[in-house]
Amino acid sequence: MAVQETGVSYYCPTYVEHARRDFQEMLDHNCTAVLLALSEFDLDFWFPNIKAIAEAGKEMGLKVYLDTWGIGKWFGGEPPSLFLTNNPGNRQVSAFTGEPLPACCFNTKAFRDYFFDLCEKLAREVEADGFFWDEPHYALPKGYASITGGAGDDWSCRCPVCQRMFEELYGYEMPRQLTAEVKRFRHDRALDILETASRRIRQIRPASKIICCVHATLGTYYVTENRGYDNWDRVAASEACDVFGTTILSYQLPRTFFRSITERTLAIARKHGKGCQRWLMGYYQEPEDLDEINKIIHLYAELGVESLFAWTYRGGHGTVLAAPRALEVWDTIGRAYGEVLGRK
């Protein structure tokens, strides 16, 4: 199947007149969609303009998706969490040390209510095409890495709420080791919050497309990162998404890795009748030869990926995470998008 959608993430939900100029630049770079990266501060402070910006994007012909960016530090992203600031007792907890971690526990009632309320408000009031679950994950406590460079043995979350829920379900105290039942509990709870949010969104806006983007790790040899969403089969089979996607890869990795991750992503998505999305690194790091970006975009298209997105607009120009040649990276992505869309 040919590429149907090309997009880029966008950090700036401030003034609609600025967004219109940026959206035109995206269109000129052959983007058909934009992902609005919405932090908790953005949602708290800029909400009236978020509504206007989403509407402007759609008026100009872009598909508009809403990214719950860094919310609770359970989703991926750099922005701080207002929820964690105001609710320090709702943090994930290290299994080995009992240390509170800088991420919310999404099993607590306080966070679930907070998150569901945000999703329902966005679904009611913002004219968008869908939602994007951005790298959801359990926190990885700091510890000794394995010999293969992955995460250490410590894990989360073993807070009082998780311990109580586990004991009610299995009839014994939650172990400190990642037993099969602990892994199953964590996977079940990780999917439950996304499935519940997706149902609530669709009750309000039935046509919403839900995209779930998980970490692009092999997770099958020596090390699994145990983020709670590493079982791609379970994620793609769930009602938490209509489109299954995997995250960016470092340009330092061999091309064979780009191919294998994409083939696995496609196979899982097709197995469960879901759309497929792959992400490109358009910030921070770049290949020595920028034509590598073009070749990778064409590789994804040739393999059958339907939706291609890059993080982020203008290569992150002006941010601490900008690619060294940020605007050239952005132009390279735009030209390649035009080619895979069949535009001259």
Image (cartoon, helix red, strand yellow):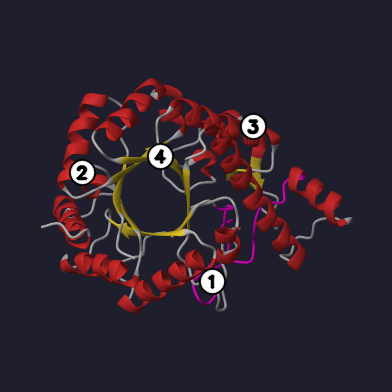
Q: Which amino acid does label 3 sit on?
A: Asp
Residue 272: mark in rendering:
none
| Residue 158 visible in the current orientation | yes
Relative height, residue 210 to residue 38 (above, below)? below
Start-end of magenta stretch: 137-160
Mark 2 / mark 1, whichever is N-terminal: 2
- Report crowding for label 4: few under 14, some 14 to 19, many 20 or more residues within 10 A (C-alpha): some
Q: Is mark 2 on a helix, strand or loop?
A: helix
Residue 129: mark in rendering:
4
Question: What residue is shown with label 2?
Answer: 26
Which image quarter: residue 300?
bottom left
Measured in 3D between alpha carbons, the distance from the residue under mark 2 to the one under mark 3, in whole angstroms, is 35 Å
Does the magenta segment cover residue 246? no
Measured in 3D between alpha carbons, the distance from the residue under mark 2 to the one under mark 1, in whole angstroms, is 35 Å
Give the x, y percent position of residue 263: 41, 73
Question: Is most of the magenta stretch helix, strand or loop?
Answer: loop
Mark 2 / mark 3, whichever is N-terminal: 2
Q: Is mark 1 on a helix, strand or loop?
A: loop
Residue 219 shown left or right of residue 245 in the figure: right
Which image quarter: residue 67?
top left
Q: Nearer the viewer, residue 15 or 207?
A: 207
| Residue 287 visible in the current orientation | no
